[in-house]
Image (cartoon, coloured by chain):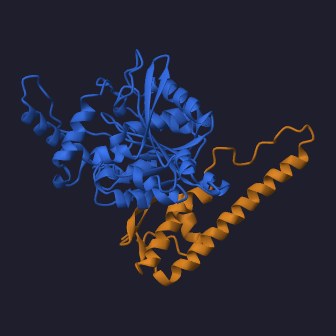
Amino acid sequence: MEITRVEALSQRIVQSYAWGDAVWHVWGSQKGLQASTKAGGVNDDANAVRSPLVLLHGGSGSWTHWLRNVEHLSQQREVWALDIPGFGDSSLPSGVTDADGLVPYIAEIFKQTFHGKAVDVIGFSFGGMTAGLVAAEHPALIRQLILVGAPGLGLFGKELPMRGMTPSMDKEAQRQVHRHNLNTMMFEHPESVTEDVIDLQEANVSRDRLRRRRIARTDVLAQAQTRWTCPVHGVWAESDALYTDTLQQVPQVLSRIASFSVVPNAGHWVMFENPEAFHAAVDPLLGH
Amino acid sequence: MLYKFKSKATGDLIMLEPQGKHILKLIGKDPGAKGIVLPNEMLAAIDALNAAVVQEELSIQAAKDASKGEGADGKPAPTADGPRAISLKQRVVPFIDMLRRAHAEDKEVVWGV
């Protein structure tokens, strides 16, 4: 299984906070590199290039949203993929129900982990909206932000025809619901939804403890952009189901972004459905 | 109006009108509703954009130096643009990459078609 293989390449870090645990997976760690470099070690230039790159996953997700990206990105950077509090293996802070409530917790995690040093962040969907709110409230923590298919722009039309689960459904019926929902929202091509992808989705959805979140449908991110001080870039899929008729409005609504790139041949979960084209879009933004 | 730059070598790049016009003028193109950058024009276009980035950085530095000179109280003087201005360097990164990749594959970059 791909998740097992990729996870085995990472260092899993569990941090304890007053509110619970935050779980990171780290690839391309400098400590690991230094340990494996017998003579000379890693020089200063290499250290500079390998500055941390933080990945924030989407709603009902975990680090596995970046399954097809961490190996590529960690060739150049130390990649830190967080399970956002309330998702994956991280705890849910008491009283948090949505992205806005997560801001102080994410800020605390960043401060603790990177000792107050500003880091580059790629935030996908819910994770992009959350990162955009963090960048507005705590500008010193983020050096550069890349938003990927982020909501909160006030551009959503009617709800997508997603299906719900009922307790009476058997395993196979539940998998059919996941298949339908992944096809509806996350992917352009039905063949992208393999049995492994349904396994991944099932494992992530079952750990989602922020089920009542709502602000993605507001324009909370568009409002926040006036307080950004770091460069922010947008990378969206050409066939993002959340932006079917509104893709070209994104750079108009997000007028504070420095660039807006469109990735062909992919749906909302762009970095999973077309990783090569996604990497081609983000690599130059990251200076790779 | 938006500028949508397309190439068979890359994904699309969308720019708001003022930024799109600025970049097209920098590479010596008429910023009309439609246009094309041919592969044999791309290296010169990249050089022109890089030169404009250097020029902007020098102007910003000169403005900073000038304001430092004036500030006898030792306080940092605010820059004309303020800290939130988006630099040309940040804006042109994906466009330069688009030109590089289109040039490598000998494909044109077009807009408005």
| Residue A10 place in picture, x, y as percent | 42, 44
Does residue B2 appear anywhere in the picture?
Answer: no
Indicate the position of residue B99 as horizontal and vertical percent values.
Answer: 49, 72
- The residue lying at 58 percent from left, 56 percent from top is B90
- Residue at x-position 33% and y-position 42%: A64
Image quadrant in which you'd find residue B50: bottom right
Q: Nearer the viewer, residue A15 or B113?
A: A15
Q: Quadrant of the C terminus of chain B?
A: bottom left
**Residue at x-position 24% and y-position 29%:** A206
Residue located farthest toward the front when viewing the structure as drawn: A38
B39 over A237 or under it: above or below: below
Horizontal side of residue A37 vs A66, given as left or right: right
Chain A colour is: blue
Tint applied to chain B in the drawing: orange
Which of A231/B35 is in front? Answer: A231
What residue do we see at 16% from left, 46% from top? A195
